[in-house]
Image: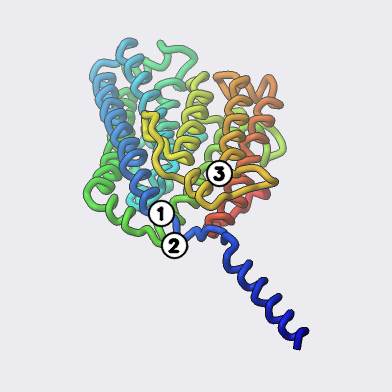
Amino acid sequence: MKKYTILLLTVFFVWSCSNNSPSSPNPDDFDREAILVNWADNIIIPAFSDLSETTSQLHSSAESFTTSPTQQNLNSLRNSWENAYLAFQHVSMFEMGEAMQLRFRDNLNIYPTDTTEIKENISEGTYDLELPSLNNSQGFPALDYLIHGLGENDTEILSHYTTSSEAQNYRTYLTDLTLRIDTLTDQILNSWTSGYRDEFVNNSGNGANSSLDMMVNDYIYYYEKHLRAGKIGIPAGVFSGSPLSGHVEAYYSEGFSKALFNEALSASINFFNGTHFEGEADGQSLDDYLDYLNTMKDGADLTSIINNQFQVAMNEAQALNDNFAAQVETDNSLMLATYDELQRNVVNLKVDMLQALNINVDYVDADGD
């Protein structure tokens, strides 16, 4: 009888201990809607509003330049282009809703731009910029060519808009491009502010079609494919085996590619931490979600690991030339080193973070990395 009594007491003790021990937090218990509200109201909509202001100014500057193609107006147009291109880096990752339907990023930032197609469009004077086949002859990269790359100096560039037999066609094409950038931007902003914001926030459940799951996937896809690979890896020859200096962003400006990269990386860091657009306040975001789950990796806090690696990548990039094409051609090892530091966070975000949040990858990784 004593044996059975001892056995029952042992089973009861083990059962009691297991039920009184703290359990791991459930990802589904976190207030996912609070993250979506912060993203929509303090990051996404303000960023698109800012882009809308800069694209409006860009189109206005293009109209002034085409009306009077002077050096002063060309300089003003270039300044407006830079401001809008920098603002675009803060929304490029948000391929949700209307932006996804319009394929916003493809319309505004496919590079290298197709200069042959641009010249054909200008020469023929008939083109439909809504056609996907013309994505690589419009947007910011095409403008880069039209205001920086048409000649060896500004005198040659200006001649295309003044004395050339196709001067009127050049002026028309330039303003058509800036108008399309501005129109698409306003269309997406209007969508967010006229109903999509509430749809986005209210879709706060879990699962592949929830706003948070889709946005996190879009964010990681952007970081991996467009920031890490597009801005650094492809020009550095990571995927081709040899450097491709002509594939840098803002190639014809000869000195703006690093600024665009820094802006994009800062935007990615701010999104992870929920930092308000053009502000210092932090709202609920992925860092808070991971902290709620007490997510650890190799004995260290995953949020800290990710943020520390972001900073390491940013520090590594500071050694790069302002002109990434020149950097690739003179010392590509620095580009490769920056790529490696960016790559380390792909693992942290795409593997460790997604596992912790119980989110599945919804895109195909086919670049062998």
Q: Quadrant of the N terminus?
A: bottom right
Residue at image mark 2: 206
Closest to the observer: 300 or 164? 300
- Residue 187 in the image: state x and y as whole percent: 27, 44
Which quadrant of the structure image shows residue 276? top left
Residue located farthest toward the right when viewing the structure as drawn: 3
Q: Is tag 2's residue or tag 1's residue first in the polypeptide sequence?
A: 1
Residue at image mark 3: 225
Residue located farthest toward the front when viewing the structure as drawn: 2
Contact check, label 2 and label 1, Cβ < 8 Å:
yes
- Residue 301 in the image: state x and y as whole percent: 61, 43
Q: Is tag 1's residue or tag 3's residue first in the polypeptide sequence?
A: 1
Give the label, 1 or 3, closer to the camera.
Answer: 1
Does residue 35 appear in the picture of this structure? yes
Residue at image mark 1: 32
- What SS does tag 3 mark? helix
